[in-house]
Image: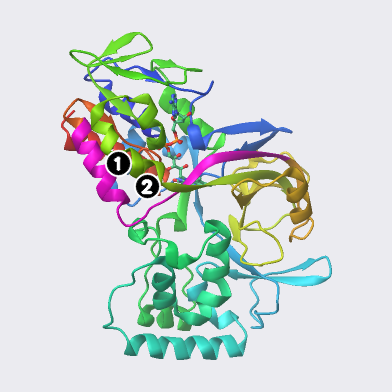
Amino acid sequence: MSGLTVNRLLSDKYDVKVFERESVPGGLIRCKNVENSLFHICGGHVFNTNRADVMSFFEQVFNLERDFIKTERNSTVFFENGEVTNPERHSMFVHRTSWVDGVPYPIENHVYMLKKELQDAFIADLLKMQRSYHRRQPQNFEEFLRWNFGTTLYNLYFKPYNEKIWHRNLKKISIDWLQGKLPMPSCGQMLYNNFNHIKESDVVHDQFWYEREGGSQYLADKLAENADIQYNTDISLIERTKNGWKINDENFDLVVFCGNIKDIVNVLKIKDVEPFANDIEHLESHGTTSVFCEIDRNPYSWIYLPSDKYLAHRIICTGNFSAQNNRMKRLSATVEFTDYISQDDILANLSRMPLNPHYITHEYTKYTYPIQSSNTRAMISALKDTLAKKNFFMTGRFADWEYYNMDAAMGAAKDMVERFDI
Ligand SMILES: Cc1cc2nc3c(=O)[nH]c(=O)nc-3n(C[C@H](O)[C@H](O)[C@H](O)COP(=O)(O)OP(=O)(O)OC[C@H]3O[C@@H](n4cnc5c(N)ncnc54)[C@H](O)[C@@H]3O)c2cc1C
């Protein structure tokens, strides 16, 4: 998405050539057809943005009315231990021998659906949070979640869910990446939303656009139309020349690197990179195993899974996004696990999960979630400023080591082009 966006932004002004390691465009947003249904090989990508300039760029490339379906997100958190007792149950599924209850997302707006003890504890949390309103800013992810949502919701959902994703103590996660990613409702807003049964807060994916055909692969294919892309070309060396750069025996005035910053140290053998090599080496990240399954029909966009009975943290019901995605009797979906998990372990986990998932295939992607530490942004920004002086630019989820959604990746590409007046 980043490289293809840069290509679009620069190709009016320059002759642009894109090098791509894979045989198709798309990177993380690639999809495959499996058993006549669409498999998002990583996650289940949907699009929306709060940035007017990104939306306008998107609308220049894509015909929203014709080629996309606008959907209200209907996501839910599954609980399996009887936490939900309110008679207005949102959903109930018999999962083998036990009940699974869905509480709509975001959970902080639906505390009225939890059992009385949890509601009482949440109210006590709100009163306590209100009294300590003026304390210092949270310093890590654990403090951010506990202080914004209270200890009850933290223990019930935010902690177990996020520990499944991040595989670490949440105290060890910096919060710089959170800006604009998660809602930060006040105590008053949470009370108001619960009193009035207000479902959504104003976050980016509460509504989304989804492609009528081809899923997010359509985005990549369309953006790649008319681009000069050399596929199956893994760039392992970018050489400095007198007036610019040499890649694959071709000379260029300017380079935009949208790959992984960890590769920069080996790919770009110039002195400017050396002082950053140690910090780059220590950058941490997670991978994702995306398992394509057939599951029981349900009305959800995606389902969050805080349960400790299995390791998967989310089911994305991609079969619900477009009728074209699903040619199965039940529903196509991707089940997400953090990091690598073997096929035997996948099967064992699926057997303990709700909605009776039937395994079809899976893909492991090594780099999916960058983890920032407190100096990551400053370090990468300094490297980018240094290299920009030599007409070498960087943008992308793993070039910037940022938790970008597609729209943020497009926005960052746009900002880079404008900032450096390329
Ligand atoms: C599980 C998951 C779910 C997500 N869901 C959503 C969602 O629903 N909505 C949303 O907006 N965003 C979502 N995202 C985020 C989205 O995937 C990213 O923002 C976006 O794909 C980043 O694009 P990119 O171009 O920066 O990086 P990438 O997609 O990683 O692209 C980098 C490209 O560079 C190529 N490359 C790298 N190194 C080299 C090299 N040396 N030589 C040649 N080619 C090279 C790669 O093959 C790849 O094609 C999700 C991400 C994950 C991990």
Would you place residue 114 above or below residue 203 in this image? below
Q: Residue at x 46, y 91 (%)?
A: 124
Q: Residue at x 71, y 32 (%)?
A: 36
Residue 116 visible to the viewer: yes
- Residue under circle 2? 402
Q: Which quarter of the figure is the N terminus placed in?
A: top left
The colouring scheme, among rainbow, by chain, secondary structure or one colour, is rainbow
Q: Where does the image place residue 3, in percent across and percent down from the top left?
A: 37, 29
- Disc number lying in front (1 or 2): 2
Picture quadrant where residue 5 is located: top left
Q: Tell whether label 2 touches label 1 (CB within 8 Å).
A: yes
Label 1 CA crowd tier, 10 Å (few <14, some 14–19, many 20+): many
Residue 383 among magenta residues? yes
Start-end of magenta stretch: 361-387
Q: Is mark 1 within 8 Å of ligand 1?
A: yes
Q: Amino acid at mark 1?
A: Ala
Residue 209 visible to the viewer: no
- Residue under circle 1? 412
Label 2 CA crowd tier, 10 Å (few <14, some 14–19, many 20+): many
